[in-house]
Image: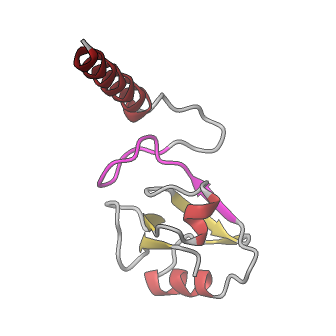
Amino acid sequence: GLGFNIVGGTDQQYVSNDSSIYVSRIKKDGAAYLDGRLQEGDKILAVNGKDLKDLRHKDAVELFRNAGYDVSLKIQRRLQPQNGPVGHQSDGESGGLPLAAVLVPGLALAAAAVWILLRYRQRM
């Protein structure tokens, strides 16, 4: 498989009044995970040039299953990853810096500083 799960469709709307197809989960070590470009929450607009607009969920799943070895996806990126529907940006728009991009390095630096301080105190 392609290594990700989808939600949505005309019969299973994920976002109210929106029958689009969304990436619900990226499977660890699957093709999408190893490629690194697709993200959970991305809206998939087309597969190999075939528009996913107004498709039932099972019809979208069939398109993915029959996509072949080389798969081209047209996506719309989610502004910020989180559970549930949020706003999206279209291709070419710049999004803000995700909070995790600031917090994770900051926490890593703080943890390293504490570790160095504790090692320094042990030597005294």
| Residue at point 64%, 60% (across, down) | 35
Horizontal side, residue 114 vs residue 88: left or right: left
Residue 34 higher or lower than 48, as above or below: above
In the rendered structure, which segment of residues is drawn in magenta? 73-88
Residue 55 x %, y %: 51, 78
Screen quadrant of the C terminus? top left
Horizontal side, residue 56 vs residue 1: left or right: left
Residue 80 quadrant:
top left
Identity of the residue furthest to the top in this view: 124
Horizontal side, residue 92 vs residue 41: left or right: right
- Whether the magenta-drawn stretch holds residue 79 is answered as yes
Which is nearer the eye, 80 or 54?
80
Residue 116 x %, y %: 34, 20
- Whether the magenta-drawn stretch holds residue 100 is answered as no
| Residue at point 27%, 21% (across, down) | 114
Residue 99 quadrant:
top left
Residue 49 x %, y %: 73, 70
Residue 78 higher or lower than 114, as above or below: below
Residue 2 x %, y %: 59, 76
| Residue at point 72%, 72% (across, down) | 48
Q: Main secondary structure of the magenta part?
A: loop
